[in-house]
Image: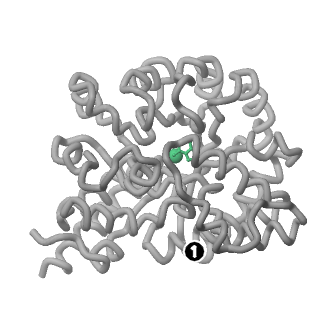
Amino acid sequence: MSIADPDFIKALPKAELHLHIEGSLEPELMFELSKRNNIEIPFTSVEEIRAAYKFHNLQSFLDIYYQGASVLIHEQDFYDLTMAYLQRCREDNVVHAEIFFDPQTHTERGVDIGVVIQGIHNALKDAKSEWGISSHLILCFLRHLSEEDAIATLEAAKPYLKLIKGVGLDSSELGHPPSKFKNVFAMAKALGLERVAHAGEEGPAEYIKEALDILDVSRIDHGVRCVEDKTLMEHLKEKNIPLTVCPLSNTALCVYDHMSEHPILDLLEQGLCVTVNADDPAYFGGYVNRNYLALSEGLGMTKAQAKQLALNSFKASYISEGQKQKWAEAIASIETIAEA
Ligand SMILES: Nc1ncnc2[nH]cnc12
Ligand SMILES: [Zn+2]
């Protein structure tokens, strides 16, 4: 079986399940919005912004990421940001996206949560009607803040719950275990929301277990440090718990020095439901197809493996069984054409 090339990767319909909309803010739009909204950023050009994107761990990235998000003020800004991402989905043949947003990053600057949600939602609606891209929205709590703050955020989101599929947990992982958010996740469950959490990115395998046992999540974001606990790996496999893995993020944040060290294909071969995602594509060097390609280049990912990863992305999503079946058939037919 041959290595998956850019044309094969592009031909595969894909779902993206781990994408922070604030992390898709390209320097060009950041610069434009800083002028449009009269918000000062410590850069004088797009090139200067890009040059600042050198990270040595998660926190060094988050500091710049939150600063970048400060240019987002109006509903139109959130619409433009989301539309720009969905245009990339179209280019990459991402047909379904489950998108994270960080309301606290905006509400703490005085931006109303309704402005954030409505701006993002309007773009999702337009992309569905214009391009047929389906989507769900996942509200993330910032784990470096308190659980009380997370509960207040969930309360503030209540008028918009029809637009929100689930809740997630992101930001600085070390020192902020999932157990810190036990009550707010229980509240989200009672409201009928799906639950996911970042765990085992920089934090230990123990945080993955906590996310499963205490927060009752159905997916783990990142989760790559599960390799340190064989019993946990067996559990993830047996219970079919997906990991939304982000290869370029992991190398950009020095979780791995080189893509050749990344365990994603080993996990795939061992039967875990791993998926490929971009995390924060404007900061980490590319969107979904670029992540797949990095696996071809760094790990020799075959077409069969790429096909399985694309299939997993739909299996792990919150779309209906009928939709899952439809995309599974589309993927199978693409393999036939490409292999003929
Ligand atoms: N990779 C990541 N880990 C934790 N929080 C994040 N917020 C945006 N990207 C993140
Ligand atoms: Zn993430």
Residue 331 in which image quadrant: bottom left
Residue at image x 50%, y 53%? Answer: 279
Q: Where's residue 221, x and y in %?
A: 45, 41
- Quarter holding the C terminus is bottom left
Is 21 positioned to the left or the right of 111 in the image? left
Q: How is the image coloured?
A: one colour
Q: Nearer the viewer, residue 333 or 54?
A: 54
Residue 220 in which image quadrant: top left
Q: Where's residue 76, x and y in %?
A: 81, 66
Residue at image x 34%, y 34%? Answer: 225
Q: Secondary structure at mark 1?
A: helix
Q: At label 1, which amino acid type do we have?
A: Gln
Q: Where's residue 85, x and y in %?
A: 59, 67
Q: Nearer the viewer, residue 18 or 12?
A: 18
- Quarter holding the N terminus is bottom left
Is 144 positioned to the left or the right of 159 in the image? left
Q: Is residue 24 above or below residue 267?
A: below
Q: Nearer the viewer, residue 281 or 328?
A: 281
- Mark 1, residues whose alpha carbon is within 10 Å: few (<14), some, or many (≥20)? some
Residue at image x 23%, y 67%? Answer: 332
Residue under numbered circle 1? 87
Q: Is residue 319 above or below residue 206?
A: below
